[in-house]
Image (cartoon, rainbow, N blue to C red):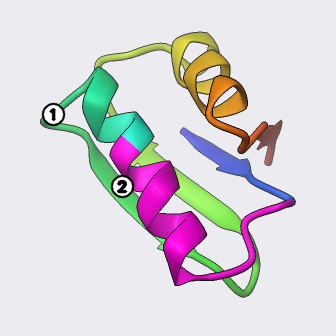
Amino acid sequence: MKFTVPNMTCGGCARGVTATIKALDADAVVEINVETKLVEVQSTQSFEAISLALAEDGFPPQAA
């Protein structure tokens, strides 16, 4: 799945996004481009579950 995180502005934000996703699915594969704010995730979790967790941690995503 792909989505953007508009308020992800630095490497620290990217680490936070990755940590949130990995907390839901330790085996998730997460690729992040901070410049384009694009996040690509391969996970067994749904987009809705990941979106909710990211929003709760201050990184509300948008569908890409």
Say few, some or many: other residues with alpha carbon within 10 Å of mark 2 (under 14 / 14 to 19 / 20 or more): some
- The secondary structure type at the circle numbered 1 is loop
**x and y percentages locating residue 64 in the rendered image:** 79, 48
The residue that mark 1 highlights is: 26
- Which quadrant would the N terminus be assigned to in this image? top right
**x and y percentages locating residue 51 in the rendered image:** 65, 25
Say few, some or many: other residues with alpha carbon within 10 Å of mark 1 (under 14 / 14 to 19 / 20 or more): few
The three-letter amino acid code for the residue at tag 2 is Val
Q: Is residue 48 visible?
A: yes
For marks 1 and 2, give the CA distance. 10 Å
**x and y percentages locating residue 40 in the rendered image:** 50, 54
The three-letter amino acid code for the residue at tag 1 is Ala
Residue at the image point whose x is 28% and y is 38% from the top: 22
Q: Is residue 34 left or right of residue 16?
A: right
Residue lying farthest bottom? 35
**x and y percentages locating residue 25 in the rendered image:** 24, 26
| Front disc: 1 or 2 | 1
Q: Is residue 46 above or below residue 9?
A: above
Residue at the image point whose x is 72% and y is 40% from the top: 58
Q: Where, by quadrant of the figure, is residue 9 drawn?
A: bottom right
Residue at the image point whose x is 67% and y is 24% from the top: 56
Q: Main secondary structure of the magenta part?
A: helix
The residue that mark 2 highlights is: 30
Residue 9: say if magenta: yes
Q: Which mark is residue 1?
A: none
Q: Is residue 15 left or right of residue 1?
A: left
Magenta highlight range: 7-19
Residue at the image point whose x is 49% and y is 14% from the top: 46
Q: Is residue 14 above or below residue 41?
A: below
